[in-house]
Amino acid sequence: MSTGVKTEIILIRHGRPRSADNIRCTASGYANWIRKYNAADLDPKSKPAKLLSLNNYFVMSSDLRRARSTARYCCGHSACEYSSLFREMDIPYYRLPFRLRAWTWVYFSRALWMAGAGGRFESYKDAKARAEMAVNLLEVRAKTHKKIVMFGHGMMNREIRKRLQQRGWTVAEKDNGYWGVNRLHLNG
């Protein structure tokens, strides 16, 4: 029997990190760029296009610094719950004899990774399994809280959104950029 209460999950991508510069680098320089990107805080010049009123939401976040900082910026306080399940899917790197822009490395390496190339990082298959666990956690919290906001990362948020849709959630808003908001509803 439907209660008429709409359950909502909002996925927000972190703001632009300080180290998101698109430098030209070798494979070893790219590996260093990844380490800096994963440890970075937010670029102070990066601001959201709009701030949502999130007062009545249960706040969850990836445990990576850029997501935690985004949660504090948007909510005025730290998240209620952090989870490594919400971390970005690994940014793979391969030792190839190229000199490319950092974001070109990201797209090229991710294409190889999604095609099955392995390395010393989380496999694409394992990352998708982690996304499934993240969705399970969000749905468990949504049963209690009805309104959830989760601060995470671009590729992981897309995978979570896709899996929520497969489970019957409706996308009301979709944006994958920095500070991007993905809003999903489940009628209950």
Image (tube, helix red, strand yellow):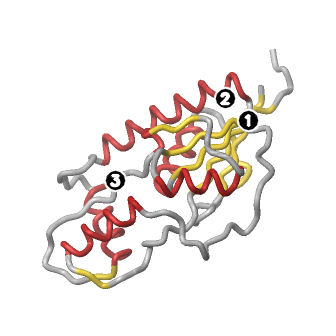
Picture disc at residue 147: 1
User: Alpha-carbon distance for marks 3 and 2?
Assistant: 26 Å
Instruction: State the residue in front, 10 or 161.
Output: 10
Are dots 3 and 1 in contact, CB under 8 Å?
no
Residue 35 % position (x, y): 31, 63
Q: Residue 171 versus residue 145: which sits nearer the camera? A: 145
Residue at mark 1 to residue at mark 2: CA–CA distance: 6 Å
Residue situated in front as seen by the camera: 21 or 4: 21
Mark 3 = which residue? 90
In the image, is 96 to the left or to the right of 1?
left
Please determine whether, in this image, residue 6 is positioned above or below residue 181: above
Residue 111 lies, in percent from the top left, at: 31, 63
Kind of residue sitting beneath label 2: Ala
Which residue is situated farthest in the right direction here? Answer: 4
Residue 166 at x, y percent in the picture: 56, 37
Looking at the image, tell me whether mark 3 or mark 2 is earlier in sequence order.
3
- Whichever of labels 1 and 2 marks the residue nearer the N terminus, that label is 2
Q: Position of residue 11 (x, y in %)?
A: 62, 48
Q: Earlier along the polypeptide chain: callout 3 or callout 1?
A: 3
**Image quadrant assignment for residue 21:** bottom left
Report how far apart the C-alphas of labels 3 and 1 lie in the structure.
28 Å
Residue placed at 69% from the left, 55% from the top? 74
Per the image, label 2 sits on a secondary structure element best described as: helix
Crowding at mark 3 (Cα within 10 Å: few <14, some 14-19, many 20+) = some
Q: Quadrant of residue 20?
A: bottom left
What residue is drawn where x is 20% and y is 73%? 27
Residue occupying image coordinates x 31% and y 40%: 126
The residue to which callout 2 is attached is 142
Look at label 3 and name its amino acid: Asp
Tell me which amino acid carries mark 1: Lys
- Mark 2 is surrounded, within 10 Å at the Cα level, by few (under 14), some (14 to 19) or many (20 or more) other residues, namely some
